[in-house]
Amino acid sequence: MKYKVLIMTFARKIEIAVNNVPIGTVFSIPDLHFPPVSSANIKVKLNRMVRAGRLQKLVNGKYYRAMESVFGATLPSTEELVKDILYTDGKISGYLTGNSVWTSMQLTTQFSGTITVGVNARKASIRRAGQKIMFIVQHNKITSENIHLLQILDALKFIKKIPDTTVSASFSKLNNIIKHLSEKDLKAITKLSMKYPPRVRAALGAILDNGEHNDLTDTLYASLNQISEYKFGITTDIMLNTSKWHIK
């Protein structure tokens, strides 16, 4: 009898630990801070909670408490769905990009069922909670300081794929975003762009080519093949110096 009481007490401790995890936060067994020797018992308890509908399983070994709405259990945020990909051993190993970021940048209002993550090594697409997670290779080192700049460069790279808008409208908004960057960020984004396709450097150069950043535009211009053309379909009222940068 005493043994059964101890087991029930530990099960209750697990429930308390789970209930202390904020709703919508994805967690794994180590996040509950029990001794590793208890992992097997904890897994059994968590799976019972899942079957009882008190807990949701995202993928094997990862769980979350869902907020209930009139439409049923809500999913965690995009960041929570992929946080184990964005961080490895506490260090940044990826960043959100693509449509989920384009909406926050106000480049589009259309949401997508696909989550895009930039990483330094090629990865196959996966699915979680009914959503596709696809990966793009980022050739620059990913740091907390440069993620917002990489997201801007990705938007320039994939500008034709931004949904529910036009290329010209997207250029206009990106032009405004880039022109409000600090001098430090402008130098950093120019350096980062060197590992992007030439069309991205041409677009960035055209945006910066207003007479105030000659050192940066000279660097970008020198990196381009002057007989190449970059077809975006931008109207001249959006960007007047397209001919100099061979943008069509």
Image (cartoon, helix red, strand yellow):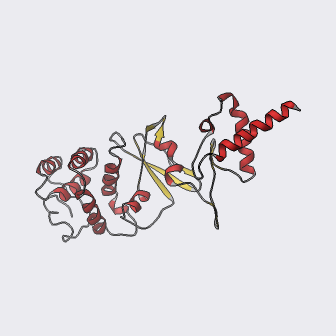
Dividing the picture into quarters, in which one does residue 7 lie? top right
In the image, residue 243 above or below residue 194 = below
Specify the quadrant that holds the C terminus. Answer: bottom left
Q: Looking at the image, which residue is at 33% across and 60% down?
A: 159
Specify the quadrant that holds the N terminus. Answer: top right
In the image, residue 245 above or below residue 94 = below
In the image, residue 19 above or below residue 233 = above
Task: Tell whether 246 sits left or right of 106.
Answer: left
How far across and down, in percent of the image, does residue 165 sit? 36, 69
How far across and down, in percent of the image, does residue 92 sit? 42, 40
How far across and down, in percent of the image, does residue 23 sit? 60, 52
Dividing the picture into quarters, in which one does residue 72 lie? bottom right
Q: Looking at the image, which residue is at 68% across and 33% down?
A: 39
Q: Looking at the image, which residue is at 26% across and 53% down?
A: 200
Dividing the picture into quarters, in which one does residue 199 lie? bottom left
Q: Looking at the image, which residue is at 14% across and 63% down?
A: 241
Q: Nearer the viewer, residue 180 or 15?
A: 15
Task: Tell whether 47 sits left or right of 141.
Answer: right
Q: How many marks?
A: 0
